[in-house]
Amino acid sequence: MGVEEKVLARIRPSAEEEARIERAVKDLLERLTGLLRSKGWEAKPFLAGSVAKGTHLTGTEIDLFVAFPPDLPRPELETRGLALGKILERGEHRYAEHPYTRGWHAGFEVEIVPCYRITDATQRMSAVDRTPLHVDYVLGRIKEGQADEIRLLKAWAEGVGVYGAEAKVMGFSGYLCELLVLKYGTFRGVLENSLAWRKGELIELDRPPGRAFPEPLIVVDPVDPNRNVASAVSVEQLATFVHSAREYLRAPSERFFFPRPAKAMTIPKLRALAKIRGSGLLAIAIPAPAVTEDVLYPQLRKAHRAFLDLFHRNEFQVFDSHFDVVGKNAVFLFEFAVDTLPRVLRHEGPPVWVKNAKDFLDKWRRSPKTLAGPFIQGERWAVDVSRDAVTAGGLAKTAWRALSLGKDLEKAAKRSLQIHSGPEAVRASNADAWSRLFDKRFPWER
């Protein structure tokens, strides 16, 4: 039995699981239909997602959409959609473009999502309105045996770390994997063709793009040419996909689908490794706001960029960095090539013959921060001044309040923000994150 046959035996739902899914879907649709009838709401519930297309893996979740008439006001759509979600156990309201409910039924994780009933993508009023069109497109074109090819691509993408369009991953969605198999025929066909992909790659199925797209990978949505199905894919995830494909085709292994879990290094090992590297370490911890990952991760990226920019502006050279959510904290880790600077800083002023040069001279002659000057350097005035902070940790402590970290993260930081430098930056609470920063192996190499 080959690698892919062995993998399919593990990821394809069993007949017993398929029967359980079918019973759960039937029961949920009956409950939704009954609830709609009792409330007098005109709407049609339907099965969506990978289960509807027959491309789901074992342990799948169930996606149910409820299509309301287009003339229903948006606030009412949201209210009714959340009311329908009450049929789920342990239901939680989630917020994407509009609210939906995630909960459980008969042992399966379930999402109930309201949308508008449309027949063409040009009629859409929200992003999820295209979903039934996606289901129809895939079901109308999928060939015998391709469901398993799609399953392989999804499981492989998850194994190498590029599966999921959510903000945390910035990778390949399930629908994107389905379209790629429809385009190239098989799992291996997708991998083989990906070797020729480059940044800005354009892939069409039935229709050319309706506009220009700026993203690294462009896959034109066959039901809406103005949408890029691959818009979430970052350039790093695109590159990781291509490299992983090359490595898998060179030496196929189940490790690409089922990598060993990453293990955190011990604190002594991490500190010893940091000592060998000879770099400066800094860890910033902020309580993770209680928001969805799709809200949290864009703020983490924004905060990460803000810290990097702060260090760059002040001449602290960041060698490597990483952000993560560890337990209840958002953690920002920085490894510095230079994390300590001299107290003296040379500040360059205007050319000597510029009219406002006097303002520069007046300011720095009176400043207690002036260590030498003002003096002429080339054609400009210059002054040696005292730095506000000589360490990266000191700078972060004094300047973080002026940074734009994201609404929820800023509120959390004002309640608690911890900064640790040097060996103290490596502690049990962030060992997982430091391990991920230092260990550059790909998942299948562990």
Image (cartoon, helix red, strand yellow):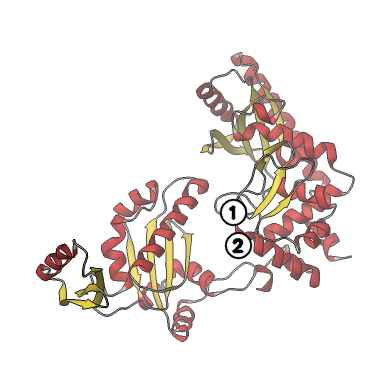
Q: Residue furthest bottom?
A: 276
Q: Is residue 330 visible?
A: no
* First in residue order: circle 1 vs circle 2: 1
Q: Position of residue 226 (x, y in %)?
A: 66, 38
Q: Residue furthest left?
A: 366
Q: Position of residue 260 (x, y in %)?
A: 66, 68
Query: With 315 as the anchor, is 149 left or right in this view?
Result: right
Residues marked 1 and 2 touching at CB (< 8 Å): yes
Query: With 71 as the anchor, is 251 left or right in this view?
Result: right
Q: Amino acid at mark 2?
A: Glu
Q: Amino acid at mark 1?
A: Met
Give the residue drawn at x 47%, y 78%.
270
Local crowd at mark 2 within 10 Å, few (<14), some, or many (≥20)? Answer: some
Query: With 424 as the anchor, is 21 left or right in this view?
Result: right
Q: Is residue 395 visible?
A: yes
Name the front one of labels 1 and 2: 2
Q: Nearer the viewer, residue 220 or 332?
A: 220
Q: In the rendering, which numbered label is found on residue 145? A: none
Give the residue drawn at x 33%, y 56%.
403
| Disc 1/disc 2 C-alpha distance (Å) | 9 Å
Q: Residue furthest top?
A: 40
Q: Position of residue 148 (x, y in %)?
A: 83, 51
Give the residue drawn at x 61%, y 59%.
235
Q: Quadrant of the N terminus?
A: bottom right
Q: Nearer the viewer, residue 380 or 343?
A: 380
Task: Write down the residue under mark 2.
Answer: 236
Helix, strand or loop for disc 1? loop
Q: Nearer the viewer, residue 9 or 229?
A: 229
